[in-house]
Amino acid sequence: MHSRRTVLTTAAAAAAAAAACATGTAPAQAGAPATARAHAGRPAVPAPATPGAATRARLRRLISRMTPEEKVGQLFVMRVYGHSATDPDPADVAANRKEIGVSDAAELIARYHVGGIIYFGWAHNTREPHQIAGLSNGIQRAAAAQRVPVPVLISTDQEHGAVARIGAPATLFPGAMALGAAGSRDDVRTAARIAGAELRAMGLRQNYAPDADVNVNPANPVIGVRSFGADPRAVARLAAAAVRGYQSARVAACAKHFPGHGDTDTDSHIGLPRISHTAAEWERLDAPPFKAAIAAGIDSIMTAHIVVPAFDPSGDPATLSRPILTGILRERLGYDGVVVTDSLGMEGVRVKYGDARVPVLALKAGVDQLLNPPDLAVAHAAVLKALREGELSGPDIDAKLLRILLLKERRGLFADPYTTRRAVDRVVGTGAHLAAADRIADRTTTLLRNDDWLLPLSRRREHRVLVVGADADAPSGTGGPPTAVLAGALRGLGFAATALATGTAPSRALIDRAVAALADRDAVVVATYNVTAGSPQRQLVAALLASGKPVVQLAVRNPYDIAQLDGVKAGLASYSWTDVELRAAARVIAGHREPAGRLPVPVLRAGTPATVLYPIGHGLTY
């Protein structure tokens, strides 16, 4: 608790300092027309205007033609297995039949009339860009063939950094906390615009990003580097920039997780977190990014499966809380866009009510879209029953449908829901986009400590480099593993670098092997990953330091590792273990780039967590 309170205090105190080191132009005036670029160097294209009265009337007529079953189906966003809408692999057909009772995406649409489909790598939706575009087109053809044709809103979680569903050859950018370290609204807007353009070229019109949580709890197990940082004002500026970037590319953005998941020590995937903020603390710490996203014209906001007693003492998670979703989000903040739940398969929303009750309560609370229920048949039947019996009112359901259809209209789905191979070839993973990702990444690596000017390494003095450490599972589509990527990048910069993966929990034998391998090396780079007080990574680093050789420590996820590593003289943070970030870190280690990142979160001293070791805004240069 002390460490969390220290971050709460330092986050507020550091706002002015963070603002001083942030770069980029001032945010556009709220309500100003957005523009888009299909890809770098192309002319700007005006975003669709806000739908007028005639459009609303047309969409209401469309709603009036729907049966109750069709209306209810439009409220759901569902997963489906397979690379094809009509011809998935046999194993994916079997998975669909087991979990959903259908064979493929086309049958899912025909049976349940779902309004949205979410792509996942593990569902085999995202093999490569042309396949993704083909899947998207197949889904839209299936939707167009229905009695009341309504295009499907295809979405994914392409946050970049630690969470990315679509990998190379699509362009992968630094994640939110890395961008927070750079502090540039221009970089955030550019990354989001390019990422949005690539998603649209593959047939996706919604991205569940940016993460608008303020990560004020270093022990947060689920947000961490997915957040821009711990300073509410800095997070607000960057979240708004991301919204403008995505939506200028005509892709709906989604700020998450309302009312704020940044101060949790429980993962809502496996439990129900409780937020102890007072109303005043929420207003100061959690609200600013969501207010900024709304002012920027955000299309959608995702709910959090968290309990906030200050706003709702019932013990219901925010996803099911009318005081939070209607009372605060709709009424106090004035938001009238689409509200989507976080996944209804997460334990945080299932601990109190059954799977048939959760979707009904979410709709009553103020939700419009129900994301990924564990059992669609149960959820659909429950909502339909509640509608027919009057627990859910017809006019309220129609209002939710209108919000959803207006979003689809704004993002051009009614005009043209399809994409082409040419669009993929012209937009996805172009040289200009990849170069932009590298330039942005070069501004993110943070040098936390550099005693005796150990860094940068010299190709003459430390020519032979050993790279050891954590090889966490690579985010989607990255080369990985991290030690190999780092070693390869250093070799490309003129070093004789070799890699030895030691993992996140190295054994004594593996530690001894790393020390032995260092004997004929001039220096070692050790990649650390979320080091805790009991982590064997501490013993690895201590053994490397005892060798007397230069040791460079690189935190490849949360930047707090250095507080647990006594004796480290050179420590950096990359905030991610994706290729683009590791290559950027290698350029800093080799002296090809200056370290330009500044901590967007404070690093607290281990053992005395009320003391700040490195404050927000800290970052050394050469």
Image (cartoon, rainbow, N blue to C red):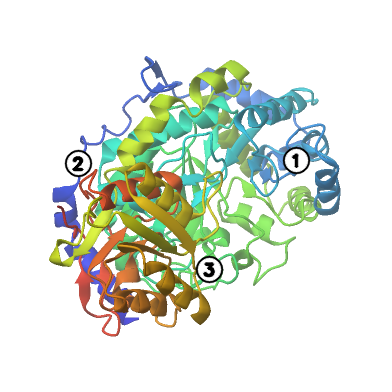
Q: Can you identify the residue that label 2 sits on?
A: 23
Point out the residue furthest to the bottom here.
607
Of the pair 55 and 594, the residue shown nearer to us: 594
Mark 3 to mark 1 CA distance (whole Å): 28 Å
Viewer-nearest of discs 3 and 1: 1
Of the pair 158 and 554, the residue shown nearer to us: 554
**Mark with earlier residue (2, 3):** 2
Tag 1, which secondary structure? loop
Residue 608, position in %: x, y? 26, 84
Seen at 45% across and 50% down, the residue is 485
Asked where in the image residue 241 lies, by quadrant, the reply is top left
Seen at 58% across and 52% down, the residue is 341
Q: Which mark is residue 621?
A: none
Mark 2 to mark 3 CA distance (whole Å): 33 Å
Of the pair 276 and 587, the residue shown nearer to us: 587
| Left or right of residue 563: residue 86 | right
Q: Can you identify the residue that label 3 sits on?
A: 267
Q: Which mark is residue 82?
A: 1
Is 400 drawn above or below residue 519 in the view shown?
above
| Left or right of residue 181: residue 153 | right
Q: Amino acid at mark 2?
A: Thr
Tag 3, which secondary structure? loop
| Left or right of residue 81: residue 339 | left
